[in-house]
Amino acid sequence: MKKSQLRDMSIAELEAKLQDNTTALENLRFQKALQQLENPLKIKQVRREIAQIITVLHESKLGIERQGKQGN
């Protein structure tokens, strides 16, 4: 999911998505331990998305609004 899509979501939606991703990451780790994981890169993708969600939540808590790339 792109950061711009995350920034358009409400706080409640972000927290719900964070909870879902945390659960998904736990399940992926169990699958890896049992050697049933089909796509090992999925763990990296979920971890990155969790970090992005936490960043957006923190920015909104601090009142920081990120602007898009600004041209000269």
Image (cartoon, rainbow, N blue to C red):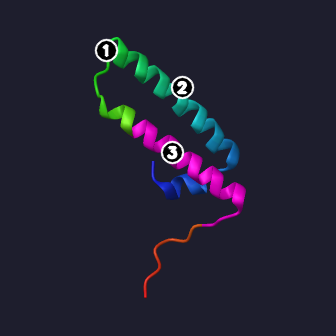
Q: Which circle's residue, 1 or 2, is located before the other in the chain? A: 2
Query: Mark 1 — residue?
Result: 36
Local secondary structure at mark 1:
loop
Query: Mark 3 — residue?
Result: 51
Query: Mark 2 — residue?
Result: 23
Question: Which residue is found at the position 46% from the left and 74% from the top?
Answer: 69
Question: Which residue is found at the position 45% from the left and 38% from the top?
Answer: 47
Q: Is residue 46 magenta?
A: yes
Q: Which circle's residue, 1 or 3, is located before the other in the chain? A: 1
Q: Amino acid at mark 2?
A: Thr
CA distance separating discs 3 and 2: 14 Å
**Residue 27: x, y in percent?**
46, 20
Left or right of residue 37: residue 58: right
Figure disc tally: 3
Q: In which quadrant of the rendered view does residue 20 lie?
A: top right
Q: In which quadrant of the rendered view does residue 28 lie?
A: top left
Question: Which residue is found at the position 32% from the left and 20% from the top?
Answer: 37
- Of circles 3 and 2, the one toward us is 3
Q: Is residue 33 magenta?
A: no
Question: Which residue is found at the position 47% from the left and 28% from the top?
Answer: 25
- Crowding at dot 3, Cα within 10 Å, few <14 / some 14-19 / many 20+, comes out as few
Q: Main secondary structure of the magenta part?
A: helix
| Of the pair 15 and 62, the residue shown nearer to us | 62
Local secondary structure at mark 3:
helix
**What segment carries the magenta color?**
45-65
